[in-house]
Image (cartoon, helix red, strand yellow):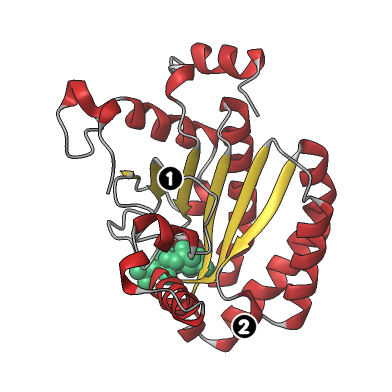
Amino acid sequence: MEQSKAMVDRCVSLGLDPNRIPKHVAIIMDGNGRWAKDRGESRVFGHMHGVDSVRSAIEGAMELGVRYLTLYAFSTENWNRPKEEVDALMNLLVDTLLREVKELSDKGVRLRTIGDVASLPSSCQEQLALAEKSTENETNLDLILALSYSSKWEMVEAIRKMIASGIRSEEINPEVISENLSTHGIPDPELMIRTSGEHRISNFLLWQMAYTEFHFTSVLWPDFRKENFYEAMHDFQHRERRFGGLADTNHNVQIQ
Ligand code: IPE
Ligand code: IPE
Ligand code: MG
């Protein structure tokens, strides 16, 4: 969807350039456990409060006209956590989808997933499939949940797919690799936000983030609100993106 007048006005009122809003923002939602610990509560309590932050991030993105929002919700490595925590996270996912899918669809949000969804419990797979189906025609925002996702898993899958298709080595190039990743058809994120003060990628979108700008904030995910999203946007708009070229020629530089 093109930016509406309301989106442009909102950007201007926040001091943002409406022409430089990223199309795709990716977020590593981190710090739920520490947030809960600070309150003497279980880690699951933190995950439950993180749902409000997901809502804020979606609202913030939609207000400004971001077209794709990818949220890292569960990594391949997160399977190594205690069973109680993993089970609670999966239940939270199902309950939230059941509760929110109607509202997502009313807002024009299309829900999609990337990751090894087949490894999730069947109740999660069923709810995800229903939510994806019932929002498939929405075009205001693509909300992409990374579930049982890791970049290395995704790359291995892509290589397997290419080999199975009988591709010849001279036919392999960056575009072909992109087409075989789970994000095919989705533009690379221009901005990645990670909360909780950790400065690492943790196996997230390694290929897709070759030239992404990173915004790190010490805010813990359950405290993340629209204001924090706007702050990340301001930070992004102050960056000079060069793509390996010179500052004044960056529009012509092709990423290989
Ligand atoms: C992020 O918060 C949520 C998931 C990884 C599922 P954490 O659970 O990693 O919280 P911290 O980093 O331990 O505080
Ligand atoms: C990254 O957070 C994964 C998600 C937010 C889903 P982690 O908390 O799992 O990452 P590390 O262990 O701090 O790198
Ligand atoms: Mg963490």
Q: Tell me, for residue 67, which label it has, or none.
A: none
Give, as a three-letter code, the residue at label 1: Pro
Image quarter for residue 251?
Answer: top left
Q: Tell me, for residue 119, which label it has, or none.
A: 2
Judging from the image, what secondary structure is the residue with disc 2 in?
A: helix
For the residue pair 152 and 47, the one nearer the viewer reads as 152
The residue depicted at 32 percent of the width and 73 percent of the height is 169
Query: Where is residue 235 drawn, in percent x and y?
Result: 33, 31
Going by the image, does 246 lie left or right of 59? Answer: left
Query: Where is residue 134 drawn, in percent x and y?
Result: 84, 54
Judging from the image, what secondary structure is the residue with disc 1 in?
A: loop
Query: Where is residue 183 drawn, in percent x and y?
Result: 52, 57
Q: Which of marks 1 and 2 is nearer the N terminus?
A: 2
Whether residue 105 appears in this view of the structure is yes
Query: Where is residue 95 drawn, in percent x and y?
Result: 77, 65
Give, as a three-letter code, the residue at label 2: Ser
The residue depicted at 73 percent of the width and 74 percent of the height is 124
Image quarter for residue 242?
Answer: top left
For the residues labelled 1 and 2, say whether their Cβ atoms are less than 8 Å apart. Answer: no
C-alpha separation, residue under disc 1 versus residue under disc 2: 26 Å
For the residue pair 31 and 29, the one nearer the viewer reads as 29
Q: Pick the quarter of the image with the N terminus.
A: top right
Whether residue 239 appears in this view of the structure is no
The residue where tag 1 is placed is: 189
Label 1 residue near ligand 2, CB within 8 Å: no
The residue depicted at 66 percent of the width and 57 percent of the height is 112
From this view, report whether residue 9 is shown above or below residue 68.
Answer: above
